[in-house]
Image (spheres, rainbow, N blue to C red):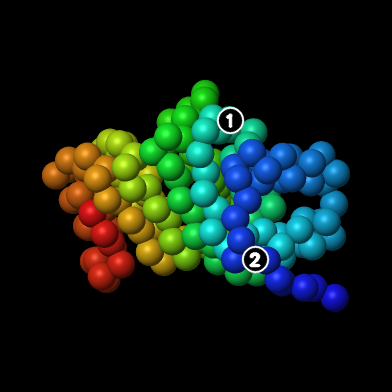
Amino acid sequence: MKVREGRHGEMDSWSIVRVCSWLQEIDDEKFYQEVAAFLPLKINLTGNILLTDVSSITEVLSYSETKHDIKISNKCQFLHSDLKGFLKNFFKTDRNIQIKLLDLGGNKVNDESASAIASYIHNIEELHLDVCELTSVGICKLQRLFPTFHNQLNY
């Protein structure tokens, strides 16, 4: 029996990373499916994020049957990478992660990160880029690749 109470609550980044890391160590598909059903619908990433953390989170999310809102805090530090590297690892082709909302508000999105976002836009329903210091080149890269997406783009 799957009880979905509490899915609207929040877990801090560290708790999500810790649970997902344990699951990755166990490496059992049944456990992935069970835990993915209980992940909060809104995931707010803050603090220091390692590539192994991204791998752990995405592995569990790939088993989720629902779409999640992902907020990457402007206080989030990607150790050993940057926003582009995070997105590349988050949306690896061997994982089918669908995101309802990707909120990058307050993060500096350079032209390379804008290209990475545009590459993975098919996995995202809604994108928030408020106060992201986008250049005109970055905006063009985003808008050119998804003309029908403009209603869900906030910048």
For label 1, the residue is 50
Give residue 37's quadrant in the image. bottom right
SS at badge 1: loop
Residue 90's place in the image compared with 99, above or below, is above
Q: Residues within 10 Å of mark 1 (few under 14, many from 20)?
A: some
Q: Position of residue 9 (x, y in %)?
A: 61, 61
Residue at x 38%, y 64% (from the top left corner): 126
For label 2, the residue is 7
Q: Residues within 10 Å of mark 2 (few under 14, many from 20)?
A: some
Residue at x 85%, y 44% (from the top left corner): 26
- Is 143 situated left or right of 120 in this image? left
Residue 68 in view in this figure: yes
Residue 90's place in the image compared with 76, above or below, is below
Instruction: Spot the residue most to the bottom.
Output: 1
Give residue 145's quadrant in the image. bottom left
Q: Position of residue 39 (x, y in %)?
A: 67, 59
Q: Position of residue 12 (x, y in %)?
A: 60, 45
| Quarter of the image where the N terminus is located | bottom right
Give residue 51's quadrant in the image. top right
Amino acid beneath label 2: Arg
Residue at x 69%, y 53% (from the top left corner): 60
Q: Position of residue 103 (x, y in %)?
A: 39, 53
Instruction: Spot the residue most to the top.
Output: 80
Amino acid beneath label 1: Leu
Gap between marks 1 and 2, in whole Å? 25 Å
Nearest to N terminus: mark 1 or mark 2: 2
- Is 77 situated left or right of 134 in this image? right
Q: Toward the viewer: 144 or 24?
A: 24
